[in-house]
Image: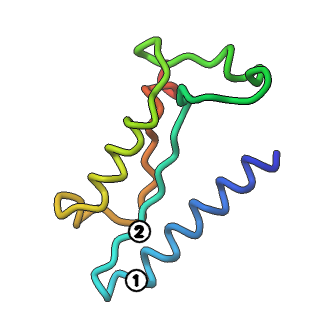
Amino acid sequence: AHVIAAKAGLIGLTRALAHDLAADQVTVNCVSPGLIDSPRAGPQPQHHQVNRTLSGQRGTPDDVATLVRFLCGPGARYITGQTIQANGGAFLA
């Protein structure tokens, strides 16, 4: 429950900051990664073992970094106040 509440708070903060900073041409977005293949101490949480993506594989840290790099560049100047799901289609599977 605490993770879901924290994510909801970040999404709300993203929208509020996007609204507050729009006049200064500052964009604010939230990247919400899905299952990312990265080193982890201890056993995998149960929900990591049962959740699947459309591609059948987990993302990598580079997948998330590529999205963040795009959002920091000029190609994303019209994107603000958004939560972008980088999850391999997990919510569609």
Seen in the picture, residue 22 relative to 80 is either above or below; the reply is below
The numbered mark, 1 or 2, whose residue comes first in the sequence reads: 1
Looking at the picture, does residue 44 appear above or below residue 19?
Answer: above
> Marks 1 and 2: CB-CB under 8 Å?
yes
What amino acid is labelled 2 in the image?
Answer: Val
- Mark drawn on residue 79: none
Say whether residue 68 is left or right of residue 77.
right
Mark 1 burial class by Cα count in 10 Å: few <14, some 14-19, many 20+: few
Q: Amino acid at mark 1?
A: Leu
- Dividing the image into 4 quarters, which one contains the N terminus? top right
**Residue found at x 54% / y 26%:** 37
Image position, residue 3 (x, y; %): 74, 47
Rendering coords of residue 71 (x, y %): 31, 57
Q: Residue at x 34, y 81 (%)?
A: 22
Q: Which residue is mark 2?
A: 28
54 w.r.t. 4: above or below: above
Q: Position of residue 79 (x, y in %)?
A: 29, 61
Left or right: residue 26 versus residue 51 is: left
Say which residue appears at 43% left-offset and 16% top-offset.
54
Residues under labels 1 and 2: Cα distance? Answer: 8 Å
Q: Position of residue 72 (x, y in %)?
A: 30, 62
- In the rendered image, the vertical position of residue 19 relative to residue 15, given as above or below: below
- Residue underneath mark 1: 21
Comparing 61 with 85, the one in front is: 61
**Residue extending farthest left:** 75
Element marked by disc 2: loop
**Which of the 4 image quarters holds residue 25?**
bottom left
